[in-house]
Image (tube, rainbow, N blue to C red):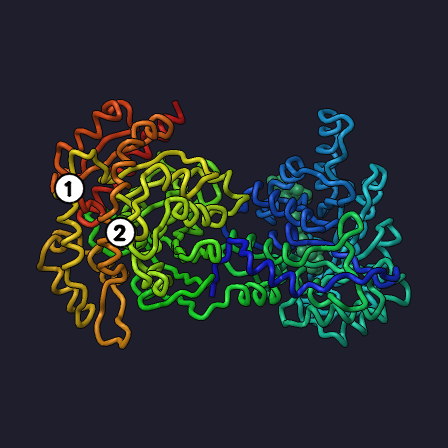
Amino acid sequence: MLTPSPVRLRAFRALARAYSVPAAAAHSKQHIVNIVEVGPRDGLQNEKGAVIPVETKVELVERLVRAGVSNVEAGSFVSPKWVPQMGGTADVLKRLTKERGVHYSVLVPNQRGLDDLLLLLAQQQLTDLGSPPLTDEISVFVAATDAFNKANLNCTVPESLQKIAAVTEAATKHGLRVRGYVSVVIACPYSGRTDYHKVREVASALLNMGCYEVSLGDTVGMGRPHEVAEMLDVVKRSVPVEQLAGHFHDTYGTAIANVLTALEHGVRTIDASVGGLGGCPYSPGATGNVSTEDVLYALQGSQYHVAGRNGGTINLEEMVDIGWWISEKLGRESASRVGRALRAKARKTTTTSLAPAINCVLTGTVLTPHSSCMLFFSLPLLPSSPSPSPAPRRTMKETYTFDPRPNYPLRLTATRYSDTANPHLHNPDALTLIFAHGTGFHKEQWEPTIAELERRVGDGVKIREYWSVEAPNHGDSAALNEDVLKLGYTPVCEWRPSWMGRVCTKPAPLLIRPRDRHSHRLFAAQARRHRTLHGRRIPVRPVLTAGYFPTLKFHSLICVELMCSSEAFGTTAKSFLINGAEKRRDTWSSREEAYNVMKTRGTWKEWDDRVLRNYIEYGLKPTGDGSTVTLKCARTQEAACYRDPIGPRRAYHLFPSFVKSTRTHLIYGAIDDYLPAAVKDDILRRVGGESSLGSYARVPGAGHLVVQMNPTGLAEKFLDALARDSKLQVD
Ligand SMILES: CC(C)(COP(=O)([O-])OP(=O)([O-])OC[C@H]1O[C@@H](n2cnc3c(N)ncnc32)[C@H](O)[C@@H]1OP(=O)([O-])[O-])[C@@H](O)C(=O)NCCC(=O)NCCSC(=O)C[C@@](C)(O)CC(=O)[O-]
């Protein structure tokens, strides 16, 4: 199961630190272990699907180096036809910010690969005179069996050795150091058990050619510790152990045991891969390398000290974080056992749900701090599309809890919708849409609109992912905060605006990972007023700019049925809403009953059926004994929001200056129900008319509850607005 974890949780870091064992004051030389981080090459080379963007690879390498790694394989100069994921290695090398004392090596299979690399180095020396070379190391590789070598390199072992000799000689002449690999040292997927004498022969040949070190690869990951020991005993007879490294894959779960065996036999360099990334494209079934996190953890407090950059060590917690980050980019969990264990402990997860369909989770699920649930669902969510729908995409839905305690008592939840098949998922030019729901609703209210957006979005608009945030007294957030909310509202707790700012500010660095922040083009959509706790309404500007995301720059803002008005309006509407909220029916015998009642009554009967079903699923929860269902956002909470005396007025006065500073689109329902036409006209006049806005639109067939009544029409207006923005950029 995929567990989302894009955030650096403080608790997690503390936990990882607690598991860290301080390095001994001094380490005798023979106990120092070097790690060669092969994740960006051996790890990524085997990834199926879309080619990983250069910027992701660059970020991966740079983060690894910041975590203390001093030897990293940054890519390979192989044919992109054979190994597509390694295309772009030249760009990776060019874009990396190089750190002193770090070897950024690249794998080179043949003369052609070396020629390409040397040309790149020569070009760089011409343009960046005096700057350090893009790399000072290559690795060459050959197998211990002909069968594997033919699959991997299209030639026999002797032929390979002949080619490598020429490559090594040329590379050395150009000042590059050369590392050698021998693959399939224990077993070969094509010819079975490997002859260890052959391993010794090939390793010796590589050293004789000028390789400074030879890494012995259990490429298939079938090796057992006693086999590793036997193999090393044979190889060590003619190869100095100081020049050997161990390279273990974890297919059968023996990688760590094999690492320890190799260390016992005097090997002091271990290849490992962050997050356990990897496999070999020519070794069917082989899984990733031993994870760097697992190696670091296994050696902590032992006689071995892992050497890191600048005489330091490699930071375990950073590596766990990177392992999760890159795994998530690849649409899966970190494969590192230590990574998973530390993350799970930090999250203290008690409930995690995975379901094949959108309507299956969260209902009645009480999220605990840092717990999250995630599911896949297919968009479009429900059929009934008049237009032909594209093939449903696999979309991930991840729900996060942000916990600002003890600084602020209320927790907040947010859901991310992303699609691993979306070509724009990592495109920094594409938009990240952030939604805020209206009073009395919940974060999932946007799902039908998002489904329509996904269905309709064309070439002109690039959307990266969607987030929907939830107010602390609504939806799942309300369940989390139930005890605090029971303290009462206005008379008991005086929720100062600065507190609001804090609760909204807190998620900002978490919601979008700090590194990603600059690469997301944020786009916010706000339905009606978005008010939080106890009668304090947050006006548009603080919510979506200074409040929720103080350090984030928004591309633009769409306000849907913006509920702000001058003092001249609103008193009657206000008491209507308060009375309605306080007296509304809030308990039903079952979800079915609730659906059947609403389907025929009040404004509910005007709602799009998808939204109504969504409301039944996400807006309601079972009561304590489970015999009935009730509202997640309690009546008192909803009414308290409407009571807010300041919010709508403040928003009214701030809105014109906000529009001047941030591109803003205004969308209203075509039916003037709760909001009289005069209020809408007044807002439009105050901002200086339609020409001052990004766009101004009315959604046909919908009143104040646009999101509920016409998600399709609303999605169309969103796309119009987004298309205008894109056009503006092109112009
Ligand atoms: C080596 C070749 C290319 C020979 O493949 P080939 O077909 O024998 O070579 P070719 O000389 O006939 O060339 C075929 C095409 O590839 C191009 N080409 C040829 N060389 C290059 C190059 N360097 N860079 C870019 N393009 C290249 C060449 O230009 C030509 O293009 P075309 O004319 O058809 O358009 C091929 O076998 C190959 O690329 N294999 C990939 C091997 C590989 O990367 N394997 C994974 C890494 S090894 C590994 O993971 C194991 C290890 C190290 O981690 C340790 C362990 O776990 O055991």
- The local crowd at label 1, few if under 14, some if 14 to 19, many if 20 or more residues have their Cα within 10 Å, is few
Q: Could you say whether the residue bearing mark 1 is in a helix, strand or loop?
A: helix
Res 495 seen here: yes
157 left or right of 489 in image: right
Q: Residues within 10 Å of mark 2 (few under 14, many from 20)?
A: many
Looking at the picture, does residue 729 appear above or below residue 621?
Answer: above
Give the residue drawn at x 51%, y 47%.
513
Q: Nearer the viewer, residue 479 or 612?
A: 479
Q: Secondary structure at mark 2?
A: helix
| Mark identifier at residue 448 | 2
Residue appearing at x 81%, y 50% in the figure: 162
Relative placement, left or right, of 41 versus 227 is left
Query: Could you tell me residue 285's position as x and y percent?
Result: 58, 65
Residue 594's label in the rendered image is: none
Identified by mark 1, the residue type is Thr
Residue 149 in the figure: left or right of residue 688: right
User: Can see residue 150?
Assistant: no
Residue marked by disc 1? 571
Q: Position of residue 216 (x, y in %)?
A: 77, 61
Quadrant in the rendering for residue 34:
bottom right
- Whichever of labels 1 and 2 marks the residue nearer the N terminus, that label is 2
In-image side of 729 versus 87 (left or right): left
Q: Position of residue 356 (x, y in %)?
A: 35, 65
- Give the spatial CA distance, label 1 vs label 2: 32 Å
Circle 2: residue type: Pro
The answer to whether the residues at label 1 and label 2 have Cβ atoms under 8 Å apart is no
Question: Which residue in the rendered view is the most extreme toward the front?
Answer: 491
Q: Nearer the viewer, residue 177 or 30?
A: 30
User: Looking at the image, which is closer to me, 472 or 709?
Assistant: 472
> Is ligand 1 closer than 8 angstroms to the Cβ of mark 1?
no
Quadrant placement of the C terminus: top left
